[in-house]
Image (cartoon, rainbow, N blue to C red):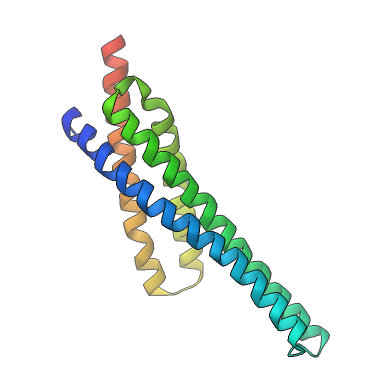
Amino acid sequence: MSIQNAKSTLKILGILSVILGVFGVIMGIGLVFGGGLFGANTLSSGVATTAQDVNNVSLVTGMVMAMGIFSAVCSLIDVLLGIFSVRASNDFSKINPAYILSIIALALSVVSLFMNFAEFNLSTLISAIPSIVFSVVLFLAAKTVKEEQTHHHA
């Protein structure tokens, strides 16, 4: 990847990352609150009549809330990655935070892929692929700029 392509990629994907990340944080927070409301409403409505029902509701509530927290944290990292990527596209000397966050985002994308793979649901598995491609391209752009910055100072 040329340095000019890397600069453009950092800027464009950085802006997209901020926009999608903000949306993801909102959705993650919504999952946390929605899961909590589901559990509270189900338990207080008297639908869960046995101890097994209460355990099932608690398990589902906990899983939904954990997914919301994971989603919100990943999305927050995407927001930060976007901010630092745009900043680095304007000043290559500030590439280190974007480079580190691109590695973290790539790792989280792979974890998300494996979580989706564990569900054996082809549609969620396919929907995780664009996230990985996005993370790989952003990582490669940050790596290109980092290498250019290293060679420039050497």
Q: Residue at x 35, y 47 (%)?
A: 17
Residue 110, placed above or below residue 98: below
Quadrant where the N terminus lies? top left
Residue 74, placed above or below residue 116: above
Q: Residue at x 28, y 37 (%)?
A: 10
Is 19 on the left-hand or right-hand side of 141? Answer: right
Residue 35 in picture, x, y percent from top left: 62, 71
Q: Residue at x 53, y 60 (%)?
A: 28
Of 4 and 128, nearer the camera is: 4
Residue 90 in picture, x, y percent from top left: 27, 27
Residue 3: which quarter of the image?
A: top left
Q: Residue at x 73, y 90 (%)?
A: 47
Of 133 and 9, nearer the camera is: 9
Quadrant where the C terminus lies? top left
Residue 81: which quarter of the image?
A: top left
Is 7 on the left-hand or right-hand side of 139? Answer: left
Judged from this view, the residue extending furthest toward the right is 51
Residue 118 in picture, x, y percent from top left: 51, 68
Is 68 on the left-hand or right-hand side of 19? Answer: right
Please count the marks in the image. 0
Residue 111 in picture, x, y percent from top left: 49, 54
